[in-house]
Amino acid sequence: MKKYSLFIATTLLISLFPGCRNSGERSTQKSTDLITTKTLGLAYLEEFKLEEAEKEFLKFIDLAPNDKFGYANLGLTYLRMAKYPEAEKELTKAIKIDSKDPDVRLILATVYKMNNERDKAIEELKSALEFAPDHLKILFEISELFSTLPDEDSQKQRENYIDILVRKAPANLVPRLNLTDILIRRGEFDKAVEQMEIINKQFPEFPKEAVEYYNKTLALLRKKDKENAIIQFTIFHNYLKVTSPYQAGIMDLKGPGGSLIGFPVITFDRQGSSSGKKENSSLLDIIKFTNVAAAAGLDIVPRIEEGMNSEFRYSTHVESCDYDGDGDIDLYAGSYDPASSSYKHFLFNNEMGKFTDVTKDAGLNHSGNEASATFADFDNDGFSDLFVMKEGGDLLYRNTGKGTFENVTDKSKAGSRTGGKKALFFDMDHDGDLDLFEILPNSNLFLRNNSDGTFEDQSAKLGPQNGGIISTGAAFGDFDDDEDIDFIVVSKNSGISLYSNQRQGVFKDIAAESGLKGYEGAGAIAVGDYNNDGYLDLFIGSVTKGNF
């Protein structure tokens, strides 16, 4: 009987082994498929190939319907496609699987924000903070949302969350600077001085240009001069924004959120690698770029195809700037449209790589052919304004700080009444605001910023300008190493002018004694310390073939 029982048991085990082997193979194959699908989906997401990413995340959901990863990243994909209802639906599924994942709730709050449902976005972030009170990105995002609301209660809430951020991340420069700004505007001078001193201790070394404004801010705070302290602090704050410690702080607050969120990698690996680069081959042979204009929403800008005979063919321009202060780069563009025989301009708002045309909503309602444009904070309020050079007269749009622009051309007396070609904003007279140098078709224009929202024509201080000058480019820098701002202008028909700053708003052309005479036919200029010796070098392009 025992032998018979043993035979049956053995027979059963033998018959089960093939099934176990097949089950193991299926499990292994499923794991492989999940890893492949996940990797491909995130790769497509990083490359902004959104339709491909959507397919992969749908596959992942089919393979693992109880895993939040697929729903969360599919929701992010729909967010970038501007399919907000679909994004909300998928993210809600992810939250049902894991209700306490703060990153998923952060994406859902972004969906609500993009769909102009700010109250729902705020509530979602508040819910996340109940179980993730130390989540820095959520704290920063909710403070940013409250900053866009004008009522007093919203501003108090913003101040509260910034205060929490400073306590949770005391080494992060960004919230501490925001807190200092709030304290100055509230007139809490002693507390503002305390924060300024902490910033000084934390920062390795201020940029040379920022030191003056740091000292001025402290002095004005001790005098309890709020209005002027705000101006000087804003300039100091703006200088710090381009420094490594500030950018590192922004990365902690708005940067990549891990594989679940699937933010694109935005840093470049400078370390050596064995990537297959052949000896003596150019780096340009290795680097590859993919045109994602259509996926990013930029394909509405008219194209000038090769061979089209348009007098405005070469007037296409693009300028970049974070005009709304949300941490990503927005675009202003202009181009001639052959289909309608008219010139069109666009303001594109960027949300995580997806651009939306907000031209009309932002108040940019002009028309006409444009030569160029530039962003600059001419009134020192911390928001970048827009200067447009066009036929029939230039335009200066003041940034209201609320996502819109106000035409202040007549009030400010900025620009040319006939229209310029190129412009530079820089502090020519070292008084803490941005002056304007503009290249016109037959002359050049120098406008001094009066610090009250208006400009004054100071072109005579550039010396005599003979009519018919066709300038093609300009740049600024401390070319004579005397710690003030000089600038250089190149022209097709009058060579090069190097204007040395003599202070008091006076400039002297020293091109001859600097060895820069005799370079007529110049078409462009670039400035930089080419050989790292501490002095600015020049590259000058020519309109004559083969010369530079």
Image (cartoon, rainbow, N blue to C red):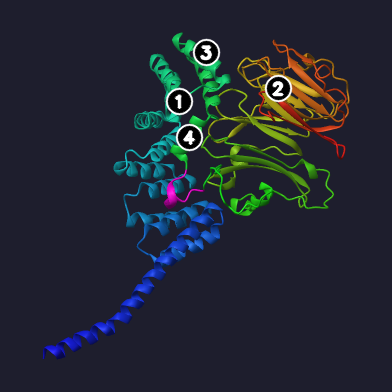
The residue to which callout 1 is attached is 177
Closest to the camera, between mark 4 and mark 3, is: 4
The reply, left or right, for residue 378 in relation to residue 211 is right
Q: Are marks 1 and 4 in contact (CB under 8 Å)?
A: no
Q: CA distance from mark 2 to mark 3?
A: 29 Å
Q: In which quadrant is the N terminus drawn?
A: bottom left
* Residue 262 percent coordinates (x, y): 47, 51
Callout 3: few (<14), some (14-19), or many (20+) C-alpha neighbours within 10 Å? Answer: some
Q: Secondary structure at mark 3?
A: helix
Q: Is residue 87 at all visible to an observer of this figure?
A: yes
Residue positioned most to the front: 279
Q: In which quadrant is the C terminus drawn?
A: top right
Q: Which mark is residue 216?
A: 3
Q: Which mark is residue 242?
A: none
Q: Is residue 211 magenta?
A: no
Circle 1: residue type: Leu
Q: Residue at x 44, y 67 (%)?
A: 33
Q: Residue at x 46, y 13 (%)?
A: 221
Looking at the picture, does residue 394 appear above or below residue 290?
above
Q: Secondary structure at mark 1?
A: helix
Question: Front-most of 58 and 89?
Answer: 58
Mark positioned earlier in the residue sequence (4 or 2): 4
Q: Is residue 261 magenta?
A: yes
Circle 2: residue type: Lys
Circle 4: residue type: Ala
Q: Residue at x 31, y 49 (%)?
A: 100
Q: CA distance from mark 3 to mark 1?
A: 16 Å
The residue to which callout 2 is attached is 413
Mark positioned earlier in the residue sequence (2 or 3): 3
> What is the magenta range?
256-264
The residue to which callout 4 is attached is 248
